[in-house]
Image (cartoon, rainbow, N blue to C red):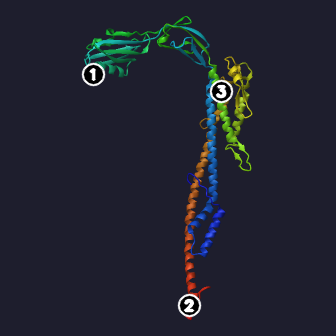
């Protein structure tokens, strides 16, 4: 019984009846059925307490599971409210361009401003790339220093005997901890090996410079290399304003808009349009309504009561009448019904945007009314789902229940402690059962031996003195 309590099937009265019958049988026959007698008597002692512990364990486990279901539903609802935190869901924008697949894209942040911008791309930012003259494969490149700088940072290499082949130099450049952002590689052509140095960043400021010290092959110096790609900034005009950027990802050029350029954008003139993403807002609100309805379903199941019929028993939900369930059943719908006051000083309700609270407690959406309400200038949506609105109030009502060490967690901790206590009581009951088994076995084994001896004595006396159907040995011998 240390972990799972198994209820006995026989009632105490039945067990005692069995025990009495065993004693009667033993008194009229040769011996007692000690094992059955002990089992019946022990069962009579522990059946009641065991049944009580089993019932408590089952009820506690059921309640614990119910609170897990409730907390999960609340957590899912809280997750659905996350997009509305600080009104973020109302500050989503789409960024579209007039030309598809022309290398221009953008991402608008929550502080972007709706509008259209004409963007002319002169050329993209490029990364500097140098290629050396040819080297014979396996040739040594001298001994000395090699300094490489780029973008205001530099690295220093020492080329020594035994590690001065082109492959050694490439490996040393790439693994150097002070590498300023240069990648070295080798291209093997028909005329031999060529060292290629590529800047990891674009922009005119990221020009690679290589200085070969005394004793090192001068073909490693950048002055002796061929420029494969010049280092240059991206150049474009936004609404006629000249803009340059070391990167092809432009941030902060237009209010909270990140502009991305790819090769296809070079030489194009396109229109970038930033507009409120009402579809994303609508999806977030619908997801919230769906999560709320799932919570209502869960709470309804956990607190439902089904009356019994002639053929079925009554059924009560695990949290029927529970204080936590009662509080939630009142507080969350209240937060929805209260709506929120907007910047216009008017209190707005969900009904204004086509959402109503039905008799079942669920949210119902009138698709047509809701779609029409999804306008950037709709103050009802701003009040309900914006910063400090109804969605925030609902989240505040949920938080105490789902947070770590919150209301539900404290209750479930208490139930878990009750289950641990039940296990301890079950273990003690096991010990008591063992003690009774030992005690009764000793007592009834002695009784059985006594009754066996008495039975043998009775047989001897009958043989000696005679019984109802026998004169006995003494009478026979007397004749």
Q: Which mark is residue 331?
A: none
User: Residue beneath label 1, please?
Assistant: 163
User: Residue beneath label 3, please?
Assistant: 286
From the viewer's perspective, is 325 left or right of 417? right
Element at label 2: helix
In the rendered view, would you say 432 is above or below 144? Answer: below
Element at label 3: helix
Q: Does the CB distance between marks 2 and 3 fall below 8 Å? A: no
- Relative image position of residue 207 (x, y in whole percent): 40, 11
Q: Quadrant of residue 404?
A: top right
Give the camera-side residue of 372 and 46. Answer: 372
Mark 2 → mark 3, Cα distance in angstroms: 107 Å
Q: Does the CB distance between marks 3 and 1 fall below 8 Å? A: no
Q: Residues within 10 Å of mark 1 (few under 14, many from 20)?
A: some
From the viewer's perspective, is 109 left or right of 234? right
Earlier-in-chain disc, 2 versus 1: 1
Which of discs 3 and 1 lies nearer the camera? The answer is: 3
- Relative image position of residue 134 (x, y in whole percent): 29, 13
Q: Looking at the image, can residue 336 be seen?
A: yes
Q: Residues within 10 Å of mark 2 (few under 14, many from 20)?
A: few
In the rendered view, would you say 16 is above or below 131? Answer: below
Mark 2 → mark 1, Cα distance in angstroms: 125 Å
Mark 3 → mark 1, Cα distance in angstroms: 66 Å
Q: Quadrant of residue 24?
A: bottom right
Please give the name of the residue rendered at 36% of the width and 15% of the height, measured from the top-left corner: 197
Q: Quadrant of residue 462?
A: bottom right
Earlier-in-chain disc, 3 versus 1: 1
- Relative image position of residue 341 (x, y in whole percent): 72, 23
Q: Which mark is residue 474?
A: 2
- Relative image position of residue 371 (x, y in whole percent): 68, 21
Please give the name of the residue rendered at 33% of the width and 17% of the height, measured from the top-left corner: 186
Question: Total of numbered circles in the picture?
Answer: 3
């Amino acid at each position: 019984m240390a972990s799972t309590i198994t209820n006995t099937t026989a009632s105490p009265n039945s067990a005692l009846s069995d025990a009495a019958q065993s004693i009667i049988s033993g008194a009229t026959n040769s011996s007692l059925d000690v094992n059955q007698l002990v089992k019946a008597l022990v069962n009579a002692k522990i059946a009641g307490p065991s049944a009580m512990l089993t019932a408590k364990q089952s009820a506690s486990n059921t309640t614990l599971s119910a609170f897990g279901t409730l907390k999960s539903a609340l957590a899912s609802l809280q997750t659905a409210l996350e997009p509305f935190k600080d009104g973020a869901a109302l500050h989503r924008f789409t960024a579209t361009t007039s030309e598809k697949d022309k290398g221009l894209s953008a991402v608008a942040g929550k502080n972007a401003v709706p509008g259209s911008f004409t963007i002319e791309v002169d050329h993209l930012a490029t990364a500097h790339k140098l290629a050396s003259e040819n080297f014979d494969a396996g040739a040594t490149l001298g001994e000395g220093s090699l300094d490489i700088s780029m973008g205001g940072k530099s690295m220093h290499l020492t080329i020594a005997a035994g590690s001065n082949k082109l492959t050694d130099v490439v490996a040393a450049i790439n693994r150097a901890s002070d590498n300023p952002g240069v990648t070295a590689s080798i291209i093997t052509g028909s005329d031999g090996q060529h060292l290629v140095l590529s800047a990891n960043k674009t922009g005119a400021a990221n020009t690679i410079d290589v200085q070969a010290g005394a004793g090192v092959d001068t073909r490693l110096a950048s002055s002796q290399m061929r420029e494969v790609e010049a280092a240059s900034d991206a150049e474009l005009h936004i609404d006629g304003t000249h803009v340059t950027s070391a990167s092809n990802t432009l941030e902060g050029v237009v209010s909270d808009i990140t502009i991305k350029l790819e090769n296809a954008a070079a030489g194009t003139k396109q229109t970038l349009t930033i507009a409120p993403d009402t579809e994303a807002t609508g999806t977030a609100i619908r997801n919230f309504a769906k999560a709320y309805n799932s919570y209502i379903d869960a709470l309804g199941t956990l607190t439902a009561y089904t009356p019994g019929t002639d053929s079925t028993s009554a059924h009560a939900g695990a949290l029927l009448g529970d204080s936590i369930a009662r509080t939630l059943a009142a507080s969350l719908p209240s937060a929805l019904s209260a709506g929120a006051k907007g910047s216009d000083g008017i209190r707005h309700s969900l009904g204004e945007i086509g959402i109503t609270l039905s008799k079942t407690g669920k949210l119902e959406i009138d698709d047509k009314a809701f779609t029409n309400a999804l306008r950037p200038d709709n103050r009802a949506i701003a009040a309900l789902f914006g910063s400090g609105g109804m969605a925030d109030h609902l989240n505040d009502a949920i938080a105490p229940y789902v947070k770590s060490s919150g209301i539900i967690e404290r209750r479930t901790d208490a139930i878990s402690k009750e289950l641990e206590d039940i296990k301890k009581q079950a273990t003690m009951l096991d010990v008591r059962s063992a003690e009774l088994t030992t005690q009764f076995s000793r007592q009834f084994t002695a009784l059985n031996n006594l009754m066996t001896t008495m039975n043998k004595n009775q047989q001897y006396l009958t043989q000696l003195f005679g019984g109802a159907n026998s004169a006995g040995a003494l009478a026979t011998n007397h004749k």
